[in-house]
Amino acid sequence: NTSFDVDSNATVLLMGLRRSGKSSICKVVFHNTLPLDTLYLESTTKPTTENFKSLIDLAVIELPGQLNLFEPSLYDYEKLFTSIGALVYVIDSQDEYLSALQNLAVIIKYAVSVNPKIHIEVLIHKIDGLSEDFRLDTQRDIMQRVGDDLLDYGLEGVQISFYLTSIFDHSIYEAFSRIVQKLIYELPALENLLDLLMQYSNFDKVFLFDINSKIYVATDSSPVDIQNYEVCAEFIDVSIDLDGLYECNNQSQQQQQQQQQQQQQQHFVSDTIIDDVNGSNSNNMMDDYDLNKPNKPTKCISRLENGTMLYLHQMIRGLALVAVSRLEDNNETTAISVIDHNVAIFKKSLEKMWENAKFK
Ligand code: GDP
C-alpha cells in the first residue's frame, strides 16, 4: 500500500474531479503562482503532498480526480482518511456538476464512517464565470442536492460548509483561511488575545497572517471585510519587498534609502516606516520569504491616502500581525509607541502559547 506520510490532524485533503481546479488552487495559494499561469497546468495524475510550516504544520494532499476511491489495493484510504483534519472537495461550477456531486456523496459517506470528526468543506469553484445571481442559485442548488444525497445515505446530521471560490480574486484565500482556522486547537484563545490587542491599540481590524500563503490563521471577532483583507494582504507584499531592499547596517545610508523608497512608494502610501531591517538578501522575496533568517523581525507602518494606517509586525513561525487603524494624525507617535508595546506583549503571549501548544 502507498502510505501517505501524514500523522497530524492539521492535514487538508484536496479532492475533486479532473480539471476542477485542485492544482491551480495549490499553486495560487501556496506557491504565489499568478492565476492566469494555471491555464495550461497538467492535470494531476498521481497524489501529491505539499507541506507548509506555519502556525500549524499544514499538509495539503491533492488526489487526482480519476482515482477510484474504492480500489484498496492502490492506496491505504482508511489510514489517509483517519489521519486528516479536513476534506476539501472542489466542484467546478462552470461545468455540469451532477457527477461531481455523486462522487462527493460517496466520499463523504466513506470519510465520516472512518473519521467522524472530519471537517467537510465544499468549494463551489470557478465562480468568476458566473453572474452574481447565478452564483447564489448554483450554491442553493448544490447545497440542496448534497443534502438530498446525504439523506439517502442516512447521513443527515453531517455538517458541511460551502464556499464560493475563484483563484482570480481573494475568495480562495478567505475560504482556505476559514478552513485552516478550524484545525487550530488554540483558535479561541488566539482570537481573545487579538480582541484585547485591538481594544487597547485602537485597531479597526487585526489579522494574524501566514506570510507566504496570505492565509490568515486568526483574526479578531469583528466580521471580515474583504477589502480590509485585500489591503492587508497587499501590504505584506509591499513590506517584504521593501525589507529586501535594505541590506546595510549603516544608519544614515539606511535612512537615505528609506527616503528614496518612500518617494517611490508614493502611489500606494503617503508615509512608510520600515524598522529593524538588516541583512536580508533574498532576490525573490515574493516566493518563499525566508522566515528563519536570524535578523530582527520586520516592522512596517504606512499611512494610506485616505488616512488609514496599516501596521505590520513579524511574529513567530512565518506569521505577521497586520492591523488596520483609522488613527488621527496628531498624536501618532504616542499612539504608535503604545501599539508597539501592546504588540510586543502579544508576541510574547503567542510565543508562550506556541511553547505549550497542542498544534506543535
Ligand atoms: P485539477 O485537474 O483539478 O488539478 O485542475 P487544474 O488545476 O489543472 O485546473 C483546470 C483548469 O481550470 C485550468 O485551466 C485552470 O486555469 C482552470 N481554473 C482553476 N481555477 C479556476 C478559477 O477559479 N476560475 C476559472 N475561470 N478557471 C479556473
Image (spheres, rainbow, N blue to C red):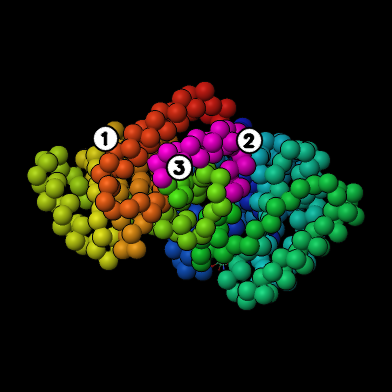
Q: Where the N terminus falls, by quadrant?
A: top right
Q: Disc 3 versus disc 1: distance between alpha carbons?
A: 27 Å
Q: Disc 3 versus disc 2: distance between alpha carbons?
A: 30 Å
Question: What residue appears at the point 70 percent right and 52 percent down from the top-left corner?
Answer: 161
Specify whether residue 69 is in view: no
Q: Is residue 343 above or below residue 68?
A: above
Residue 118 lies left or right of residue 244; in this view the side is right
Residue type (three-letter) at the residue carrying disc 1: Asn
- The residue range painted magenta reads 178-202
Q: Which residue is mark 1?
A: 295
Q: Which residue is mark 3?
A: 198
Q: Disc 1 versus disc 2: distance between alpha carbons?
A: 32 Å
Residue count near mark 2 (Cα–Cα under 10 Å), binned few <14, some 14–19, many ≥20: some
Question: What residue appears at the point 38 percent right and 54 percent down from the top-left corner?
Answer: 326
Residue type (three-letter) at the residue carrying disc 3: Met
Q: Is residue 194 above or below residue 287?
A: above
Q: Earlier in the sequence, mark 1 or mark 2?
A: 2
By secondary structure, the bulk of the magenta-drawn segment is best described as helix
Residue 16 locus on image (x, y percent): 68, 57
